[in-house]
Image (cartoon, rainbow, N blue to C red):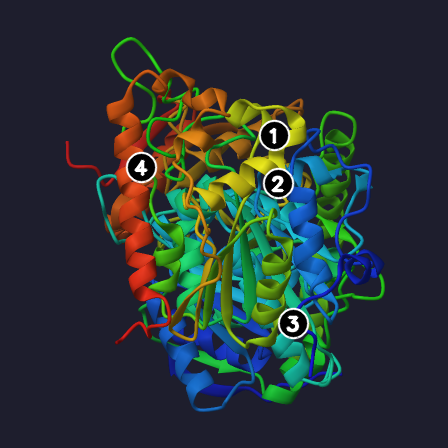
């Protein structure tokens, strides 16, 4: 029986993941997310990466921070690219070019732009075709690579460079879409939300995903120092508060069964999370807008409490 | 070794392409249906369903994903093929450049069809001409028989130079026109194309590499220059592979350019694809009337055969270039611009005129071929004409 969770010591001994020397911003949590995900694999990994922050900061010819096979093609096609890699693996195994007993875990990384928006079609296609891979979304809630523009992951009220908080319009006027539910609606065997602040849960989810044949999806919240506007020492704290306020609930849908993995003893008001971020500072004197955000969170949380332990078709 | 063990079939261009793909038995095919190339995907799916090939078929949700799957699979060392047309090729556009720059020998059959708008499903070359600078080898076939043999040759060419290759055939005219195709047997195909030896593979766990990194001003230029090396190599490899094929199977396909009744020609028509068939017929008739006219049919446009064109147009008084696409430069279609540019360094150049014809599937009857010959003859005699004229246009 495989261990569900690895200790940090065990994880640190695994060589998969990212080498040091990449150019991610100080405080950016995605290098840790990548290391935790890939370190969770008991087999070699092959990685595909959508265009975005992660791709840009981990490679620049002739340097690479990837000690594992890695491919990047374009922004909107990472799910299709990994589909091709995974299909070729199957074909070459069937034809005897690749040893039949070789096991590889295929992982795609995309930001919210490459996942919620421009890459949604290719993601949907790959999920529907049942390719065997894990898609990991690192969700920093805007197009950070091009300089903080709104995405459909950007929360209501957030200031971005294309949803600026102005005299008339108070930041983004739409709520974010629920990507985990959208992906789960493809009836894939495993979909989950995780946070780097709750690393035990994140690793367990990655290890659970790697056990399953077929398409898997994990959405990981990834606070962004310049995009959200907070001190670089506070990324993990911001991720933790997103969980404690239930803005980012930790849950999974494992073969159709919902499971809430973490219920805060004391559910914090969302204001605690908002007031730590410059992107929401214009909201602090607008309680009705904060109420709107809080109501949305409460609605979703209530729904998840109800769904907890239920099968989708129940 | 010479084998003339042809098997005759009555097949359309699409069927011929699919049949070649079956014999090639690629590792991965990822494709999306689009008129007029849909049948290729349909027929191939049937081969997969009936176990006649061992290919992994990926029925993607768009052409963009088709080419993206091809890139992922080809970068994994697999032999990969696809087919598309028109809007599908346009949707792939972004990934075409990536396939070429990663030096992936993907082979794609294109049923040449007009691009929207307005929307049209019939033949012209605006689709393929739109991707002429994407870094793919581009070949255009005159008939379905040539499509069949070219698809097989394309696999070997692409894999020898590590560049992707597009094989074009005119939408409906060739894709749906039935002809007698002479095929070679499965074993001969297998032997001719042998196995792919990839430059690298993302599945190489022991020697992990990073494919497609960020590449800015300090190396991008050098990488683009080295990509050109592949195209320069293709100039040598294409004739070698075509020659080997012709030798082995007793065929007579051109590598870059076919010459037709050029021996004592005083002026020539330069054309591509199926229109060359009509033009050959027209030239035969005009030859009987005593006109010294010949035909140069360009088979391969990337790499562009500029040296051969200089050689073959030597001594001609005039050339009439046929373009089944617009370039919007207001100086004619893309083929004429490239042909004229190829001849520019010569001391003595023939007069040149461009004929834009057949857009959106407009019929190209033999009367129009006569018109083209007639105008080019008058040009050779010194009469003045505009830079380009439209043939077959309702005015």
Q: Which numbered marker is on residue B343? A: 1
Label 4 and label 3: CA atoms lie apart by 34 Å
Nearer mark to the viewer, of 3 and 2: 3
Query: Does A18 sit left or right of B384 as displayed?
Result: right
Residue designated by label 4 = A294
Residue at (53% x, 61% y) in the render: B69
Q: Which residue is mark 3?
A: A4
State the residue at coordinates (34%, 36%): B356
Whether residues under marks 4 and 3 lie with C-beta atoms below 8 angstroms apart, the answer is: no
Q: Is residue B221 above or below residue A208?
A: above
Q: Mark 2 sits on what residue?
A: B309
State the SS at label 3: loop
Dot 4: within a 10 Å radius of its alpha carbon, few (fewer than 14), some, or many (20 or more) residues? some
Pick the front one: B87 or B374: B87
Gap in angstroms between the C-alphas marked 1 and 2: 8 Å
Nearer to the camera, B84 or A142: A142
Residue B169 showing in the rendered view: no
User: What is the x, y in percent for residue A115?
Assistant: 46, 48
Front position among marks 1 and 3: 3
Looking at the image, residue B276 lies above or below residue B118 = below
Farthest residue to the left: give it. Answer: B395
Q: Give the spatial CA distance, label 2 vs label 4.
A: 72 Å
Compute the Cα span from label 4 to label 1: 72 Å
């Amino acid at each position: 029986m495989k261990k569900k969770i690895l200790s940090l010591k065990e994880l640190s001994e695994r060589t998969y993941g990212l080498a040091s020397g990449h150019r991610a911003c100080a405080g950016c949590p995605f290098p840790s997310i990548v290391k935790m995900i890939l370190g969770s694999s008991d087999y070699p990994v092959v990685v595909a990466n959508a265009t975005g922050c992660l791709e840009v900061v981990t490679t620049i010819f002739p340097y690479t921070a990837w000690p594992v096979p890695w491919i990047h093609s374009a922004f909107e096609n990472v799910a299709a690219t990994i589909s091709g890699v995974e299909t070729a693996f199957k074909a070459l195994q069937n034809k005897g070019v690749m040893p039949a007993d070789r096991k590889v875990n295929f992982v795609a990384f995309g930001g919210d732009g490459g996942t919620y928006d421009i890459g949604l079609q290719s993601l949907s296609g790959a999920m529907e075709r049942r390719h065997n891979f894990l898609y990991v979304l690192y969700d920093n809630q805007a197009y950070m690579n091009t300089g903080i523009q709104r995405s459909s992951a950007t929360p209501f009220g957030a200031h971005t460079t294309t949803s600026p908080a102005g005299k008339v319009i108070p930041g983004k006027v739409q709520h974010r879409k629920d990507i985990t539910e959208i992906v789960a609606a493809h009836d894939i065997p495993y979909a989950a939300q995780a946070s780097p602040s709750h690393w035990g849960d994140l690793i367990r989810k990655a290890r659970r995903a790697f056990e399953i044949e077929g398409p898997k999806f994990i959405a990981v919240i990834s606070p962004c120092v310049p995009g959200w506007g907070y001190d670089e020492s506070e990324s993990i704290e911001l991720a933790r508060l997103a969980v404690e306020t239930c803005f980012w609930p930790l849950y999974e849908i494992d073969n159709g069964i919902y499971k809430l993995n973490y219920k805060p003893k004391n559910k914090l008001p969302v204001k605690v999370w908002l007031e730590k971020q410059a992107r929401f500072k214009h909201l602090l004197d607008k309680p009705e807008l904060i109420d709107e955000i809080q109501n949305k969170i409460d609605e979703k949380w209530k729904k998840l409490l109800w769904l907890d332990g239920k099968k989708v078709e129940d | 070794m010479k084998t003339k063990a042809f098997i005759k079939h009555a097949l359309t261009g699409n069927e011929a392409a699919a049949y070649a793909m079956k014999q090639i038995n690629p590792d991965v095919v990822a494709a999306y249906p689009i008129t007029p190339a849909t049948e290729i995907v349909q027929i191939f799916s049937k081969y997969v369903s009936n176990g006649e090939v061992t290919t992994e078929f990926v029925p993607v949700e768009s052409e963009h994903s088709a080419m993206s799957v091809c890139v992922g699979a080809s970068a994994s060392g697999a032999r990969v093929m696809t087919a598309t047309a028109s809007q599908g090729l346009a949707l792939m556009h972004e990934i075409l450049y990536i396939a070429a720059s990663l030096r992936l020998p993907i082979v794609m059959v294109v049923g040449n069809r007009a691009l929207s708008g307005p929307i049209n499903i019939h033949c012209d070359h605006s689709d393929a001409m739109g991707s002429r600078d994407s870094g793919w080898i581009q070949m255009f076939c005159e008939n379905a028989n040539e499509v069949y043999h070219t698809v097989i040759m394309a696999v070997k060419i692409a894999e020898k130079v590590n560049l992707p290759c597009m094989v074009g055939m005119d939408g409906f005219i060739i894709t749906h026109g039935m002809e007698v195709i002479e095929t070679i047997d499965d074993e001969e195909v297998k032997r001719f194309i042998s196995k792919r030896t990839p430059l690298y593979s993302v599945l190489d766990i022991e020697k992990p590499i990073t494919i497609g990194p960020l590449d800015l001003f300090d190396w991008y230029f050098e990488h683009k220059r080295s990509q050109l090396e592949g195209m320069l190599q293709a100039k040598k490899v294409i004739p070698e592979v075509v020659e080997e094929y012709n030798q082995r199977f007793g065929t007579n396909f051109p590598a870059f350019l076919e010459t037709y009744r050029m021996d004592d020609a005083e002026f020539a028509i330069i054309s591509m694809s199926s229109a060359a068939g009509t033009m050959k017929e027209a030239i035969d008739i005009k030859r009987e009337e005593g006109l010294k006219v010949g035909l140069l049919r360009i088979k391969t446009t990337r790499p562009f055969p500029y040296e051969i064109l200089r050689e073959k147009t030597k001594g001609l008084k005039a050339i009439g270039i046929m373009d089944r696409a617009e370039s919007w430069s207001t100086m004619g279609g893309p083929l004429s611009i490239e042909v004229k540019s190829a001849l520019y360094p010569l001391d003595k150049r023939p007069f040149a005129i461009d004929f834009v014809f057949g857009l959106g599937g407009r019929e190209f009857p033999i009367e129009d071929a006569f018109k083209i010959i007639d105008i080019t003859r008058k040009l050779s005699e010194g009469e003045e004409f505009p830079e380009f004229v439209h043939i077959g246009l309702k005015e």
